[in-house]
Amino acid sequence: MALDTKTDLNSLGFAKAPADTRVVVAMSGGVDSSVVAAQLAEEGYDVVGVTLQLYDHGAALAKKGACCAGRDIHDARRVAEEMGFPHYVLDYENTFREAVIDEFADSYLAGATPVPCIRCNERVKFKDLLETARDLDADCMATGHYIQRKMGDHGAELHSAADANRDQSYFLFSTTPEQLDYLRFPLGHLPSKDATRALAARYGLSVADKPDSQDICFVPNGNYASVIEKLRPGAAEPGEIVHADGRVLGTHEGLIHYTIGQRRGLGIGGLSEPLYVVKLDVDTRRVIVGPKEMLSTRIVPVREINWLGGEAFTSQPEWHVSVKVRSTRPPREAVIRPLSETEAEVELLAPEEGVSPGQACVFYETGGSRIFGGGWIWKGR
């Protein structure tokens, strides 16, 4: 049936036929973005696939479970061939190193616990790649992220994925309203990853059974310390492990081996009480440990805030929302008190353990699915 462009919108929200709608699909080579590209191609859209080479994939070929390596570029190209749309590989290695990897290393050296996947979305995929999509005269850019874009009273809104187990909203809080106008997330409404794989099988995609990536793409086997030592030779300087009461309990081989809240692998066995990393003192190179109750935090300072709440962030003295302070934790009720357009104090109604500088604090509608943005936790208690 022909589209009535006067009244009807196509599935991407444009008042024109799919064949007249160009969409750039960000293809990682995994099953999610491949299904997005195949689905849009099948619906008749003018699809252009783009894959980013983010680092030297020659060194990454032996590493399984990572995105954007040489194998993944091959897989993305193969899907494009199978579905009959053009595919381009863009070399973003220098951009990725400057915008993501260098900050990752420096943050760890400063005693923080960074989330490079957020910075990659913010500074590479939704910035440079999005501009490339515009240069290709695309009407929009689609990705395989599990998150929903819905239209509200003030324009496009960001909402959690239908499948809470796959939801990626924590990693996309810094998406700006302007970017959200241009982006599309066709998988966000699906009930499960099984539904995605079923679509891949239906389209006959060669990646239908490809395993999900587990690690940060440039960190083999989750070994952060080895990557940082390569990026910053001499970074692993030894120091003391000190109890919060001042007792020296042992020594360590570098702060980069520790994170706030860590209990295992401290190398200080034989004590009567379980101890946790409660602070990393960069100036003295000390790992400070203490009992679990010392990890509890209620006041969280946040900066670099991206606000998606419609009305101005500072239009109210406080906002009652729910927040996530780590990607693996459920949202908890909180009060945000704006200090400026980009800084705030977040008060958790119930204390959280292991709140760490360098992590994101993401704002959610209490009892709902909408994301109101978020910011970066930036200093200790």
Image: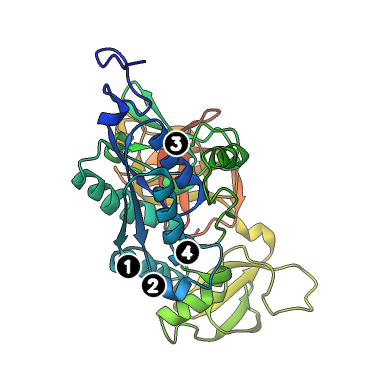
Alpha carbon distance from label 4 to label 3 = 22 Å
Alpha carbon distance from label 3 to label 1 = 29 Å
Image quadrant of residue 8?
top left
Q: Earlier in the sequence, mark 2 or mark 1?
A: 2
Q: Name the mark on residue 39.
A: 3
Q: Residue 208, percent across and down? A: 56, 48
Q: Nearer the viewer, residue 113 or 299?
A: 113
Pointer 2 with pointer 4, Cβ within 8 A: no
User: Mark 3: few, some, or many residues within 10 Å (few <14, many ≥20)?
Assistant: some
Pointer 2 with pointer 1, Cβ within 8 A: yes
SS for callout 4: helix
Q: Which residue is mark 4?
A: 71
Q: Which residue is mark 1?
A: 93
Q: What's under tag 2, amino acid-wise?
A: Asp
Alpha carbon distance from label 2 to label 4 = 12 Å
Q: Nearer the viewer, residue 75 or 245?
A: 75
Is residue 28 in sight in this rendering?
no
